[in-house]
Image (tube, helix red, strand yellow):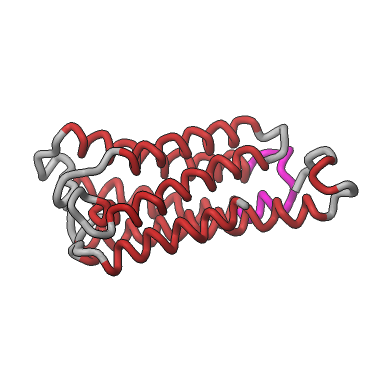
Amino acid sequence: MAAGCVLAGTVAVTVAVVAGPGPGLTGYVSEAGIAGSAYAPTYRIGVFALAAALLLLAVALPAGLRAAAGLLAAGAVCTALSGAVTCSDGCPLPPFETPTVADLVHGGASIAAMAATVLAMLVISFSPVAGPGLRRVARCGAAVALPLAGAVAVGLVTVGRGSLVGGLERVLLAAGVGWGLATATVLGLARRNVPGGSTGRKPSM
C-alpha cells in the first residue's frame, strides 16, 4: 500500500508540475500548487498521497526502529501541512525574496519533511535492528539524498530561486521517492515470507 501511495503521489505531482503553468526547472516544485492554478488540486492530492506513504512506511517498520518511525511520522505530518498551506506566486523564500507567512509555513514544512525523511534513512542505515535489506536501501538512499539536501540548503542561501536549486530539488525528491519505493518493496517481500502473513510478528528486514 505504501508503494502504491508513493507511485500515485509521484505521478500526480509530476503531472501538475509538467502540465501546470509553472516556470519549469527555474522554479520550485511547490509552484504547481499555488492558488489559481488549474492543476493545484492534482498537486495537493499527490502531496497528500506522499504524506500517507510516509505514514504507512512508519507503521510498517519493525518495532525496534521507533526513532525512524517517529521521524517518518513527523515527515508525514509536515508533508501534509505543506500540501494544505499553499505558497504565493513564485513561492518566495528568504534571503533573496520577501515571503508571506503562508510561504514560510509551506517552505518550512517542506524542508522539515525532507529533513525528517533523510534522517530516517540515516537511523535505519546504522540500526542493528534493521535487517540487511533495509539497511542497504537506506544507505543507498542516504548516500544520494544527504549531499543533495546539503547542496539545496547551500543554494537557497547563496543563489536563491533558479535553475540550480530547482534542478537539485527535483533530483532530491526523486531520491526520496526511490528510497520510499525500495523500502516499501523490502518490507512487503519480508511480510510475505512470514508464516501467517500480516498476522505474524514484524520481521527484521
Query: Quick one: 39 or 141, which is closer to the camera?
Result: 39
Residue at 28% x, 59% y is 39
Image quadrant assignment for residue 115: top left
The residue range painted magenta reads 126-137
Q: Residue furthest right?
A: 195
- Decide: is 104 above or below 191: above
Query: Quick one: 140 or 1, which is closer to the camera?
Result: 1
Image quadrant assignment for residue 198: top right
Magenta residue check for 130: yes
Residue at 51% x, 60% y is 7
Residue at 55% x, 40% y is 55
Residue 183 lies, in percent from the top left, at 62, 53
Query: Number of labelled discs?
Result: 0
Residue 57 lies, in percent from the top left, at 60, 44
Image quadrant assignment for residue 29: bottom left
Residue 117 lies, in percent from the top left, at 49, 43
Magenta residue check for 153: no
Q: Tell me if 99 is positioned left or right of 69 in this view.
A: left
Residue at 28% x, 69% y is 19
Q: Residue furthest bottom?
A: 19
Q: Tell me if 6 is positioned left or right of 102 in this view.
A: right
- Decide: is 7 above or below 103: below
Residue 58 lies, in percent from the top left, at 60, 39
